[in-house]
Amino acid sequence: MTVTSSVVCEGCGFEWSSITPSQLPTRLRNATTTFVDVLRTSPVALSARPIPERWSILEYAAHTRDVLISIRERFVLASIVDGHIGTPIFRDERVDLGFYKLDTPEEVAEELQASSRLFVRTFEALPAGFENRVFTYSPISKADVTILWAGAQALHECEHHLGDVRENERLLGD
Ligand SMILES: [Zn+2]
């Protein structure tokens, strides 16, 4: 099964099929630059959860950093290995096991910036046509996707979680 075009995020309206390889780098850079600005300048408590079910701004940022690292690995390996199966990120387990508990806003800001730069640079270095290579995104979802779709997924994570962070600022600022 190839993930098709008609998917739209109910939360933020992101449309995976509308993303082209040429627009992805700028949009991703813009989203992570804004994210980093929030980590450096937001007046609200970055490690506070407004409600128990929502992550803190710092946890959303750490998750987004890890997403960029994880998806970059998936598309590099999908470029090399036919029939590659990506490694799932296990988003909640990382938080629940405390892997983010030593993260500080300044460290995460630097790491998010660095992982964004690295992601974009690697994506831009893809050999011609490789954005159409297909791989299995994760052994859990078993969805077959293209490298371009995975790039759009990374962009969606950055933009969607930036929206979560703005919502946290609103909830904590009230
Ligand atoms: Zn979304």
Image (cartoon, grey):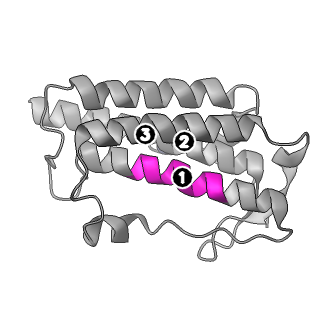
Instruction: State the residue lying farthest toward the bottom.
Output: 139
In this picture, residue 32 sits left or right of residue 128:
left
Give the alpha-carbon distance from disc 3 to disc 2, as whole Å.
15 Å
Circle number at residue 156: 2
Q: Is residue 65 magenta?
A: yes
- Name the residue at 33% across, 42% down: 108
SS at badge 1: helix
Q: Is residue 172 something that shows in the picture? A: yes
Residue 167, horizontal then vertical, whole percent: 27, 35
Q: Which residue is mark 3?
A: 112
Which of these two is toward me, 140 or 7? 140
Q: Is residue 93 above or below residue 39?
A: below
* Sequence-earlier tag: 3 or 2: 3
Which of these two is toward me, 135 or 104? 104
Kind of residue at badge 3: Leu
The answer to whether the residue bearing label 3 lies less than 8 angstroms from the nearest atom of ligand 1 is: no
- Residues packed near mark 1 inside 10 Å, few (<14), some (14 to 19) or many (20 plus): some
SS at badge 3: helix
Location of residue 154 (image quadrant) = top right
* Sequence-earlier tag: 1 or 2: 1
Kind of residue at badge 1: Ile
- Name the residue at 26% across, 45% down: 58
Residue 171, horizontal then vertical, whole percent: 16, 36
State the extent of the magenta-drawn residues as a range. Answer: 63-73
